[in-house]
Amino acid sequence: MQIYGHSKQLKFLNHLLKNDVFHHAFLFVGPELIGKRLIAKSFGQALVLETELSKKYQKNVNAWRDILLIEPEKEIKKGAEITKDISIKQIRELKKQLTLTSDGDKRVVIIDNFHKSSISAQNSILKLLEEPHENTIIILIVSDTNKLLPTISSRVLRINFGLVSDEELLLIDNVNEEDVKIAMGRPELLKRFSKNTELSREYKQALEILKNFKKMSLSEKIDLADKLSKDFCLLNVTLILWSSIIRNIAINTKKYQLLSLSEKINDALYDVKFSNVNKRLRIENLLLHL
């Protein structure tokens, strides 16, 4: 599996590896689907094997005896796949595993989508950060630091990851320029397009909706809310794409007030994914106030 982009971050991580300079905990921060998880896996493997972090990741079974990967569990509700919060139960199980003897000199814990952890799970991880296990390195992967306890951010080495350039995305096998533009700097999303043409179609549909949104009447927005609430895949794709586009515009034009609009969309997406709100009413409220 190839890592695309993030040259500065990879250079820094390799500097740590080369000079045997280690922090007990890292925080990988950046937008979703840009490759943070893949880099964390490659970095974790390099830590255990004491080798260089390669842009071409290939899983080493022996190394993964000392790498623990925690991520949100999924369940099916009303025909849609829902991602649950990382629970305190998962963290307790992790702590039990950390009491066992490791095979090598180092052990790595990777927690993906850590911002989707319950408060109790975060507090439990905080105790690990405050009293780290010897030779254990924790990598937390997040796309929304606002969901983290402030005390966690102060106890980790933060590394920021950004979107990947179109030039680098075009290096991915079996991609086209149209999909590269829609992916908007997210290599892992682009890889999914090449495997799932239906996903690519949904993103194009979401982009078309955004182009026509300003011209929509009140009744058309209400109809759109109803349509999105009945199609969770389209809803998920639409809100992720809208948030990304608005964020890019805000940064590129320095109209930073638009970032609050991007956050408003992210909050709505979080609510429909992880809470018991009425999806149609929540999306209707969002669309009427954009």
Image: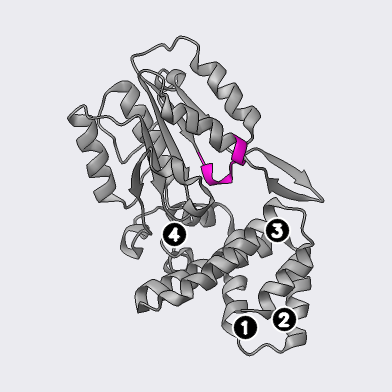
Q: What's the CA distance linking mark 4 and mark 3?
A: 31 Å
The nearer-to-camera label among 4 and 3 is 3
The circle drawn on residue 272 is: 3
Q: Amino acid at mark 3?
A: Val
Image x and y of residue 191, in percent: 48, 52
The circle drawn on residue 175 is: 4
Q: Secondary structure at mark 2?
A: helix
Question: Is 75 left or right of 141, judged from the image as shown?
Answer: right
Q: Residues within 10 Å of mark 1 (few under 14, many from 20)?
A: some
Q: What's the CA distance linking mark 1 and mark 4?
A: 28 Å
Image x and y of residue 262, in percent: 52, 69
The circle drawn on residue 221 is: 2
Quarter of the image with the N terminus in it? top left
Specify the quadrant of the image occupied by residue 23. Answer: top left
Work out whether mark 3 precedes mark 2 in sequence or the reverse, and give the earlier one: 2
Residue drawn at x 73%, y 41% as measured from the top left: 75
Q: Amino acid at mark 1?
A: Phe
Specify the quadrant of the image occupied by residue 177. Answer: bottom left
Image x and y of residue 205, in percent: 62, 72
Q: What's the CA distance linking mark 1 and mark 2?
A: 8 Å
Q: What's the CA distance linking mark 2 and mark 4?
A: 33 Å
Q: Which residues are magenta?
A: 112-120
Q: Amino acid at mark 2?
A: Lys
The circle drawn on residue 213 is: 1
The nearer-to-camera label among 2 and 4 is 2
Residue drawn at x 45%, y 39% as measured from the top left: 140
Q: What's the CA distance linking mark 1 and mark 3?
A: 21 Å
